[in-house]
Amino acid sequence: MLTGTGLLLLFGYIGGKLVSSTKLPPLIGMLLVGMALGPYVLNWLDSDLLTVSQDIRTFALIVILLRAGLGIKKDQIKQVGTIALKISSIPCFLEGLTITALAVLSIIITAPLGAAAIYATAPKLLTKGKNKKIKIQKRFDKVF
């Protein structure tokens, strides 16, 4: 596991430097190295490292979000505060309204169809039930 971690760190750093020389973000090089060393290409990583990879990814995401969040200044938040609030809340409200409208529409459309189906089949079900009951009662009387 330590060997795999060392390989990832060393080759990831080298891949990041190579890709950054092409004016692309170094993260792309690190991702490519991770995919190359992983189980689908070279398979140089231990299975133990692969089992804890989800925890490592979660930890990396937390670090990235903290660095991004701590890099924001109060003045920047004041400049884009209302725009950011609109961008983050409007899609949520629209999604909720769409789901609600589709649910109401499906109830409005299916309720009359369901009522018509029940109205059409209920008398037949009731008469079939009575017929079976009568037949069962006759058989029951023959036994006793």
Image (tube, helix red, strand yellow):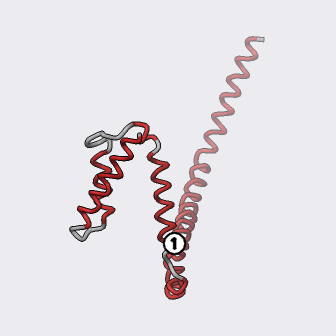
Residue 2 position, x and y percent, is 41, 42
Seen from this angle, which residue lies furthest left? 22
Q: Toward the viewer: 25 or 118?
A: 25
Residue displayed at 65% across by 37% down: 127
Per the image, the residue denoted by label 1 is: 69
88 shown above or below 107: below
Residue displayed at 26% across by 41% down: 42
Residue 8 position, x and y percent, is 34, 49
114 sits to left or right of 29 = right
56 sits to left or right of 115 = left
Q: Quadrant of residue 138?
A: top right
Seen from this angle, which residue lies furthest right? 144
Residue 143 position, x and y percent, is 74, 11
Seen from this angle, which residue lies furthest top? 143
138 shown above or below 10: above
Residue displayed at 78% across by 11% down: 144
Q: Quadrant of residue 12?
A: bottom left
Q: Toward the viewer: 37 or 14?
A: 14
87 shown above or below 107: below
- Crowdedness of circle 1 by 10 Å Cα count: few (<14), some, many (20+)? few
Residue 37 position, x and y percent, is 30, 45
Q: Quadrant of the N terminus?
A: top left
Q: Secondary structure at mark 1?
A: helix
Identify the amino acid type marked 1. Answer: Gly
70 sits to left or right of 47 = right
Q: Toward the viewer: 82 or 111?
A: 82
Residue displayed at 60% across by 54% down: 115
- Numbered disc total: 1
